[in-house]
Image: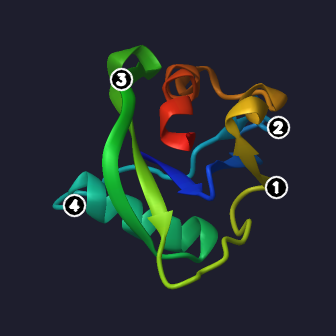
Amino acid sequence: MGAAIIDDRRVLACERTSPPEVAGRWEFPGGKVEPGESDVEALARECVEELGVRVEIGAQVGPSVSLAHGRAVLRVYAARLVDGDEPKALEHSDMRWLGADELADVVWLPADAPIVAALPPFLA
């Protein structure tokens, strides 16, 4: 699961540190759903772990994307920061707020490309 954290018509992009084959590429924060968790619970937990922020989860952005030979599915949900929290790059080498006209300024992971294409209406 991933969170497209949106604030002031911009989305938060995070730069991967590992594994080596994807280090330096950009993604939406998030991770795996643990047994017994919903997508929303997993994203809330992952945003605290990766960014030190609490988020409110909204609608799914773009299509669900099959990953790694169909073994997993990526779903990204719009999210917003709660209580004025400021994200910190706790598990990423960098992070950046991007407006709709800046989405192509970073090299996204291939699985995130369909989500990025669906983002502009969320940033209007």
Please tell me which of labels 3 and 1 falls first in the chain. Answer: 3
The amino acid at mark 1 is: Ser
Question: From what the image shows, is residue 124 above or below residue 12?
Answer: above
Q: Which residue is mark 3?
A: 63
Q: Which residue is mark 4?
A: 37
Image location (x, y in percent) of residue 11: 62, 48
Task: Determine crowd level at label 4: few under 14, some 14-19, many 20+ residues with C-alpha closer than 10 A.
Answer: few
The residue tagged with tag 2: helix, strand or loop? Answer: loop
Residue at the front extreme of this rendering: 124
- Which residue is depicted at the point 59% across and 65% down? 50
Task: Determine crowd level at label 2: few under 14, some 14-19, many 20+ residues with C-alpha closer than 10 A.
Answer: many
The residue tagged with tag 1: helix, strand or loop? Answer: loop
Question: From what the image shows, is residue 69 above or below residue 109?
Answer: above
Location of residue 34 by image quarter = bottom left
Residue 15 in view, yes or no: no
**Residue 24 got which mark?**
2
**Residue 107 got which mark?**
none
Calculate the distance from the C-alpha at mark 1 to the C-alpha at mark 4: 27 Å
Asked whether the beta carbons under mark 1 and mark 2 sit within 8 Å of each other, the answer is yes
Task: Determine crowd level at label 3: few under 14, some 14-19, many 20+ residues with C-alpha closer than 10 A.
Answer: few
Calculate the distance from the C-alpha at mark 1 to the C-alpha at mark 2: 8 Å
Residue 24 in view, yes or no: yes
Q: Which residue is mark 1?
A: 93
Task: Determine crowd level at label 1: few under 14, some 14-19, many 20+ residues with C-alpha closer than 10 A.
Answer: some
Calculate the distance from the C-alpha at mark 3 to the C-alpha at mark 4: 21 Å
Please tell me which of labels 1 and 2 falls first in the chain. Answer: 2
Nearer-the-camera pick, 3 or 71: 3
Please tell me which of labels 2 and 3 falls first in the chain. Answer: 2
The amino acid at mark 4 is: Glu
